[in-house]
Amino acid sequence: MPLFNSPEPSFDALIIGAGALGLCAAAELRRRGRRVAVVDPGGVNASAVAAGMIAPAMECAIDGLSPETAQVLRRARDLWPAFAEATGVRLYGDQAEWRGGNVAELAARMAALGFQHDYDDASARLTTREDAKVDPPQALMALAQGLTVIAARALRASPDGQGWRVETTAGALRAEHLILATGSGSALDGLPPAARATVACITPIRGQIGLVKEKLVDHVVRGPGAYVAPMGEGSVIGATMEPGERSLIPDAARCEAMLAAAWKALGQAPRTLTIDWRAGVRGTTPDGLPMAGQIAPGLHVALGPRRNGWLLGPLIGAVVADTTEGRPVAEPALHPSRFL
């Protein structure tokens, strides 16, 4: 039987990719009364292989980010409470902790960027209440609730008189606006040169995490080489950052090193755990900030959040929704034109 009654169903917006950025954009557009569909082949994507950190303070301190970037991440974090309430995503946690290593340097960076924090030099611990998290499985399900999600692979996109026509393995679809949230994937056939050049800016980064059924912590604990965070009824251990790697097969040596770093951060002797190790590939841009905005008439991107896809999701969703409505660019620093 055909997937739809009409031969080529039409939508206000068609999003390619059902990761955090794609679903946040879809949810925001739907909140604004737009008819939205998401095309995704299914399976575990990079947003599912994640801890779901909403962590501007820790991310800025760990990576030594600029004040301008810190403000972008702050603005993204500040959108989360209302967005979570509107979409049914569970947002929780009001404390994150760093133990050991260059803790004094991290505390100094947090202070310089104006993030609330408490630093105890004697115990080499740094805590902040500016960070939170979501659980990716629950968040992905909540964001997809009520959306038209088409289990298919997008093959080719081409402009037509009313917008865009997309050929998929489930048939052809039309939309006034096409939004590429394709992660580290390659460009669709048929895209204009500017769009292909934009997608070519994305570099893959593999991240590995371990899912544990045991509740190891009640808040996020980070340290050199690893973090441990609550995840549902259990915990998640993460995460590697491996630029240029695309393999979805976990690397045993790297996972063992991460586990050893996690035990050290927890200050506990290693013990036997049953761990489901997973690998996912996310995308990043040359400057580490995502790309969000219009790159051709009716064609938009939501790409390259590095490891901050969950943090940036509502902000990227709002930026993309604004561009489909012809509104001024709210976050010029994220516009893809900076690389073209």
Image (spheres, grey):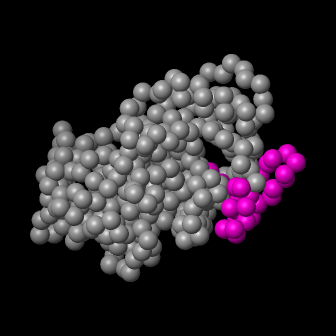
- Give the position of the C terminus as an image quadrant: bottom left
195 and 256: which is toward the camera: 256
- In the image: residue 340, left or right of residue 215: left
Question: Where in the figure is residue 41, as x and y percent of width and height?
Answer: 30, 40
286 and 116: which is toward the camera: 286
Identify whether 146 is placed above or below 262: below
Q: Residue 120: say if magenta.
A: yes
Q: Can residue 293 be seen in this snapshot?
A: no
Question: Where in the figure is residue 118, as x and y percent of width and height?
Answer: 80, 58
Question: Where in the figure is residue 155, as x and y percent of width and height?
Answer: 18, 46
Q: Which residue is drawn at 38% across and 81% down?
A: 328
The residue most toward the top is 272
Question: Where in the figure is residue 262, as x and y percent of width and height?
Answer: 67, 34
Q: Residue 317: say if magenta.
A: no
Residue segment shown in magenta: 105-133
- In the image: residue 95, left or right of residue 238: right
204 and 29: which is toward the camera: 204
- Give the position of the N terminus as an image quadrant: top left
Q: Can residue 76 be seen in this snapshot?
A: yes
Identify whether 312 is placed above or below 97: below
Where residue 76 sits, quadrant-wise, is bottom right
Q: Which residue is drawn at 38% across and 65% down?
A: 292
Where residue 68 sits, quadrant-wise, is bottom right
Identify whether 204 is placed above or below 248: below
